[in-house]
Amino acid sequence: MAYASHLLNHSRKLRIASNLVHHDPALLVRWFSSDAQTSINRKSDLWKMRSQGYITSTRNTVSGTVPNFTRNLSVATMKMDSIGGSLFNGGISRGSHVQRRRGYASAADLPPHQEIGMPSLSPTMTEGNIARWLKKEGDKVSPGEVLCEVETDKATVEMECMEEGYLAKIIRGDGAKEIKVGEVIAITVEEEGDIAKFKDYQPSASEPATAAPKEKSAAPPPKKQAVEEPTREPEPKVSKPSAPPPSGDRIFASPLARKLAEEKNVPLSSIKGTGPEGLIVKGDIDDYLASGAKEVSAPSRAKVATDAALDYTDIPISQIRKITASRLLLSKQTIPHYYLTVDTCVDKLMSLRTKLNSLQEASGGARISVNDLVIKAAALALRKVPQCNSSWTDDYIRQYHNVNINVAVQTDHGLFVPVIRDADKKGLSAIGEEVKQLAKKAKENSLKPQDYEGGTFTVSNLGGPFGVKQFCAIINPPQAGILAVGSAEKRVVPGSGPEEFKFASFMAVTLSCDHRVIDGAIGAEWLKAFKGYIENPESMLL
């Protein structure tokens, strides 16, 4: 009981158990009953307790003999980790989800503290960067205060403090790059007098971070990686093969040998392995270098067939560009794209826009762009043909009831796609104002997760800003369609008489469809509806 009392005195999460009793006693009974472990899969209870702040998002590090109710709470919290992760991967995210791990007094005489991990701030985030800390070591922090700015895969997001205390140690400082989700970035304590005890603190390397799982890598080499090279007789220092291995054969090498070969720029195909079953070990690399073989310099490997030297600059890849590249590659590799193109006459659209802008200027409102009218027409067409407002899963096609349009915005930091929610229900002036505000935030790299998550369809316009006549866009997963908008151009078309001609402006649009979700006839039906709204724009105002 003395240990239980110690836990209660040092953990705010247990001290607020009375609040849980007061607000939801049934929930408390389920969690602290003897069959808590068997009922742990009740996700609704988990999510409810987490959202109300009764349990943290990471597991307790309590060890030793603990009273039964504490053990149940620890089990509940550990189960929360796995369920919370699956929810985030499924698209449910919270803007300030902070990974936290509570530590208690140990043999090292460390006071109660919390390890704050790199938060998961979007469903696709696996790592992030620290832009800057707004609090410094020793500062008092309160719930809701901003600790630091984190560069995610899509934007720069403020990370807020979740509990009251003091910032004792900053593990990863300003500008720290490629920090895995869950990796410890700071330590907080409850008492100001405990700050000095964490001056030289380093997080334990034995505790795994709660980072998102990486993709499975290639099969590992034979298990005996650390086997020392067999004893060799002095004379046969054989390291070069008589012939390189056949093209396409896999080369087996220990991790240490691969690292050394990479550092020395030695091609593994030139090495004959002396380890088990031909495994290349570190000694083989050493022998190869000792035999007089020269290191292959990086410029030599990158040299082109001609003797002319290339002048180039290596440009660092931003986090947003990395994630954009991986998602676009995934889209083209896994989504069966097909494309439908149609020309739309925009003479009436341009005339209506002129009239509306006159009214806007008279009332002090912002001007309406062609892109605002395109977004509205696309949203109404999605409401008319809801099959295109869907996404694919392995078990079913999910059809959305909200029409949320992502708008592609190019910035110096990369490509952003902020979302206009319920675009089918908003007026043109509201859409225009929202697009301007989101585009400004995108260029300032200050978008929040709620500014770009939850889209059901995307519009990309390279016509108005860049004069591109026509192009095919890549689908933004998990959506099933994206509209590529080209520029408007004047054409000569037949007039009313037999030998009469007139000029008309036409804009080419291309719909990229996921064939798993949108059949060709459905895509054509959507384009027909879209074209109808563009060529008769007054119908959008009804």
Image: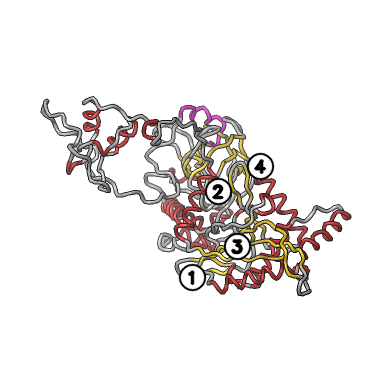
Counting other residues with Cα less than 10 Å from the Cα at mark 3, is it few (<14), some (14-19), or many (20 or more)?
many
Q: Nearer the viewer, mark 4 or mark 2?
A: 4
Q: For this rendering, which residue is in front, 42 or 502?
A: 502
Can residue 472 be seen in this snapshot?
yes
Residue 444 disc label: 4
| Magenta span includes 198 | yes
Circles 4 and 2, Cβ within 8 Å, touching? The answer is: no
Mark 4 or 2 closer to N-term?
2
Residue at x 37%, y 46% (from the top left corner): 65
**Residue where numbered disc 3 is placed:** 510
Question: The residue under label 4 is which amino acid type?
Answer: Glu
The residue range painted magenta reads 188-200
* Residue 271 position within the rendered picture, expressed as x and y whole percent measured from the top left: 23, 36
- Could you tell me how far apart the alpha carbons at marks 4 and 3 are, in whole angstroms? 30 Å
Q: Quadrant of residue 156?
A: top right
Residue 529 point in image, percent of width and height: 66, 71
Residue found at x 46% / y 27%: 200
Structural crowding at the residue carrying mark 4, measured as other residues with C-alpha within 10 Å and reported as few (<14), some (14–19) or many (≥20): some
Element marked by disc 1: loop
Give the answer, above or below, for where 290 lies relative to 135.
above
> SS at mark 2?
loop
- Residue matched to label 1: 396
Disc 2 target residue = 121
Distance between mark 4 and mark 2 Cα atoms:
18 Å
The x and y percentages for residue 522 are 57, 73
